[in-house]
Image (cartoon, grey):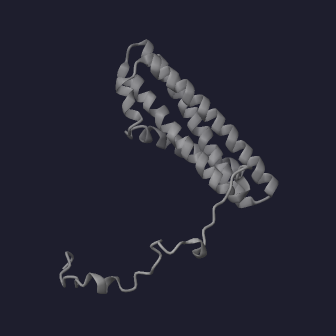
Amino acid sequence: MKRWAITLSAAGLLFGAAPGLAQETGPQVEIAGTTNPREMSQYVRAALEEMMASMKTVSKLQEAARRESDEEMIRCVQVKLSNIRALMMVSERANGAMKEAQSSSNSQRSEHEFRKIVVSLAKVRQFVAEADACMGDAGSAPGTSDVQVSQAGLTEGDDSQALDDYFLVVGVDPADVSPFN
C-alpha cells in the first residue's frame, strides 16, 4: 500500500510538473517553430520509441538490482522507472493532442504539445543516466574499462607542482574594501 502511495504521488508530481516543464525552451525545442507537421510526427515517433527502449533498459536495471538484493539500489532505480513511465504517458497523450491540433490546423497548440514531448525525452534520457548511476559498479556493461591514474604515472613535464607560493609569486595584496561594506 505504501508503495502505491509513493508511486501515485510521484506520478501526480510529474503530471503536475510536466506542463510547467514543457514551457522551458532550449536548442532542441526551438525546432518546433520551423518544423512542418510531418517532421514533427516523425520526431515524435522516434522519441516515443526511444522512451520505450529506455523504459525497457531501466526495467532490466531494476531486475539486476533485485538480483543484487540491495534495497537502496532497488528503490533508486524504481523511482527512475516510475518517472520514465509517467513521462511516457504524458508524451503519448501529448502525441494524441498534437495530432488532433494538427488536424484542426491549430499550429500553436500543436507546437505546445510537441514541446512537451521534446522536454519529456530529455528528462527520460536524464532518468536513464541517473538509474545507471544508481546501480554503480553493478550496472556497468561488460567490456567497459576503468582508467586509474596515479602520481607515479605523471611525467616530469606535467604541471603537478603544488601552488604553495602562489600569493608570493603574484605579489598583489587584496584591497581592504568589500562590496558588502
Residue 24 shows up from this direction:
yes
Which residue in the rendered view is the most extreme toward the front?
Answer: 156
Q: Nearer the viewer, residue 170 or 19?
A: 170
Q: Is residue 181 left or right of residue 124?
A: left
Horizontal side, residue 134 vs residue 99: left or right: right
- Looking at the image, residue 36 lies above or below residue 20: above
**Residue shown at the point (37%, 20%) measured from the top left:** 107
- Image quadrant in which the C terminus is located: bottom left
In the image: residue 131, left or right of residue 71: left
Label count reads 0
Q: Is residue 148 above or below residue 2?
A: below
Q: Residue at x 40, y 18 (%)?
A: 36
Residue 85 placed where, x, y %?
Answer: 62, 38
Is residue 39 placed above or below 8 in the rendered structure? above
76 and 172: which is toward the camera: 172
| Residue at x-position 46% and y-position 20% | 39
Q: Position of residue 112 (x, y in %)?
A: 40, 29
Residue 137 coordinates in the image, percent (x, y): 70, 59
Q: Residue 144: percent from the left, percent from the top?
A: 69, 52
Residue shown at the point (63%, 66%) measured from the top left: 148
Q: In this orientation, does residue 6 appear?
A: no
Q: Is residue 102 above or below residue 174?
A: above
Q: Quadrant of residue 108?
A: top left
